[in-house]
Image: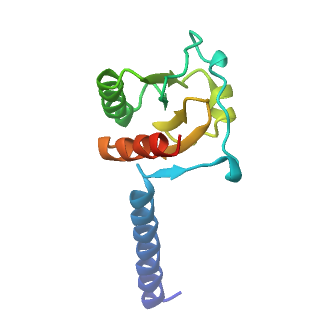
Amino acid sequence: MNSFEIILTLIGLIAVATALGLAWQKLNGRARRTSAAHGATAVDLSQFPGSPTLGETATLLQFSTEMCSPCRQTHAVLAAISVEQPTIVHIDVDLTHRSDLANRFNVLQTPTTLIVDRHGIVRARIGGAVTRATITAELDNILVTA
């Protein structure tokens, strides 16, 4: 392989890595809605530490790990929303020693947030740090379709 081919290969690798990074950044923190018609799952909270209960309108189920920096930001956003809206419950589950829950809910990154309706059905899933606007929009959607 001559030097020209090496340079072209390196440029190609940089272009592919940049495209993958931009795609990951665009999808990170974005809500993906689910519905019963598309395989929405029900959440059984009895398997979580302390056996928490569902919120009257919604539950913000956050999966975190001990060494996750974006998890703290997500926790602050979700906790603030649940304080302001008492019918919404925020549950933060540490997956550090709970690989069974990570597998059950297919958590591939932390934080991962599931927005669960009052019936325990997962209505949206967000991988990565959340924004208040994203959570509010998804909660509004749940209330409208409830």
Residue 120 visible in the snapshot? yes
Q: Quadrant of residue 44?
A: top right
| Residue located farthest toward the top when viewing the structure as drawn | 50
Q: Nearer the viewer, residue 57 or 116?
A: 57
Q: How many numbered marks appear?
A: 0
Q: Give coordinates of residue 16: x percent, y percent.
A: 47, 73
Q: Position of residue 45 (x, y in %)?
A: 62, 20
105 shown above or below 91: below
Q: Is residue 80 toward the left or the right of residue 4 in the image?
A: left
Q: 145 or 136: nearer the eye?
A: 145
Query: Which residue: 68% across, 53% down?
Result: 38
Q: Residue at x 43, y 52 (%)?
A: 30
Would residue 144 appear left or right of 120 to someone viewing this image? left
Q: Is residue 86 left or right of residue 41?
A: left
Quick check: can you spot residue 129?
A: no
Residue 21: quadrant of the picture: bottom left
Query: Vertically, is 38 above or below 82?
Result: below
- Report the side of 59 relative to 34 (left or right): left
Rendered location of residue 77, percent (x, y):
31, 32
Q: x, y (%) of residue 141?
A: 45, 46
Residue occupying the point 64% across, 36% down? 105
- In this picture the colour scheme is rainbow
Residue situated in front as seen by the camera: 10 or 55? 55
